[in-house]
Image: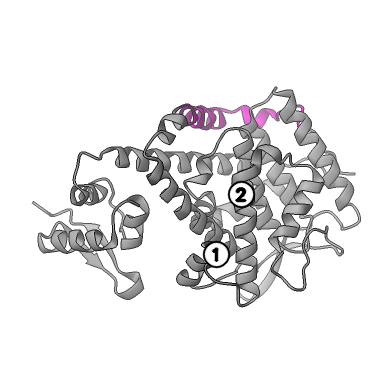
Amino acid sequence: MRAFDYSKIPSELLCSEIINLLAAIHEYKGKQELFIEAKPDILNAMLEIAKVQSTGASNRIEGIYTSDDRLQAIVKEKVEPRNRSESEIAGYREVLQLVHENYDYMNPRVNVILQLHRDLYQFNPMSIGGRFKNSDNVIAEIIDGKERVRFEPLSSFETPDAMERLSSAFIEAINSKQHDPLLLIPMFIFDFLCIHPFNDGNGRMSRLLTLLLLYRSGYIVGKYISLEMIIEKTKITYYEKLEDSSREWLETKHSYLPFVKYYLEIVLSAYKEFSSRVEHLHNRTLSKTERIKVLFDNTLEKLSKKDILEKCPDISMSTVELTLSDLLKNSYIIKTGVGRSTAYIRNTDYR
């Protein structure tokens, strides 16, 4: 029987790398309320953007796609889902909204986890939601057309009892307040993934539970910056660290360190982006044109129109297009790509 005990933090998680990550996140959390005191309308715009990004990214990680236009319309509840993929996207939207609005009242007990999974599939006419797996499953990947099993989770027979013990152990550890929630949360999420309790939807549930547990511990950055999108951008690393940590998990000889470190880096990355955006928004003494120019000043990466609108949600598309046209004429930026791949990058040879 696989045991779960969060009453003691493994000594490997008390290394300097983890301590430094915790300290940095704590510092950003201390500034969190100051960030939130920024213009409410701007934060509301950031919230709406993050909902779309989170819903799209979390589903794309699992191979569930729709067009950008349909994604926007589904998240904003302007259209009904028209196929299975869009039904699952709509389900994620619903659970994400539920977590955003009610996290204070949602202790991660088994009945809550099952209800969230049920709601994830509420638009599926052949609903598979709200029940633990009824057959054994594996975590596999396809390489050169061949399937490779990365990990064999607990059997379906063992799953209900394991989930009860997992939930109880986590809640007891959180309530004791002896250990930093930022360590307990990724440990819980990792063990959840190793149990792999559902026939489908385990990855998406893990990301929704991540937000729920972070919000309950006061770390609300995921409302405004999509953690799911950061994970999507680092998906290869995510799977590598999950595999690294899962070796000998059944024997309780595994190492939480690779996965916990990765998850803390995701949270810190989100806080850095949140801080950067809020600081940029505070710079309201500059004109909108100057603020767009500052975006290019502060990065060597390519920026699309979509990127600019996300970073400056109070600036209209027409203003963005006029500013880009002026910056191109002055050779301050360079245009790259065509069509949907069009982006702009600062001209480092500009004088």
- Residue 36's spot in the image, x, y percent? 44, 35
Q: Is residue 134 left or right of residue 301?
A: right
Q: Is residue 256 visible?
A: no
Q: Which numbered disc, 2 or 1, marks the residue that appears first in the sequence?
A: 1
For the record, the magenta segment spans 6-30
> 237 or 78: which is nearer to us?
78
Image quadrant in which you'd find residue 333: bottom left
Give the CA distance from mark 2 to mark 1. Answer: 36 Å
Q: Residues within 10 Å of mark 1 (few under 14, many from 20)?
A: few
Image quadrant in which you'd find residue 79: bottom right
> 284 or 331: which is nearer to us?
284
Relative to 201, say whether 263 is above or below: above
Residue lying at 69% horizontally and 46% vertically, measured from the top left? 190
Whether 101 is among the magenta residues is: no
Q: Amino acid at mark 2?
A: Lys
- Residue 177's spot in the image, x, y percent? 69, 23
Image quadrant in which you'd find residue 189: top right
Q: Is residue 137 left or right of residue 61?
A: right
Name the residue tied to disc 1.
Answer: 77
Name the residue tied to disc 2.
Answer: 241
Disc count in the image?
2
- Residue 277's spot in the image, x, y percent? 36, 43
Residue lying at 86% horizontally and 52% vertically, measured from the top left? 159
Residue lying at 74% horizontally and 27% vertically, measured from the top left? 175
Whether 28 is among the magenta residues is: yes
Q: Is residue 259 left or right of residue 279?
A: right
Q: State the SS at label 2.
A: helix
Q: State the SS at label 1.
A: loop
Q: Amino acid at mark 1?
A: Glu
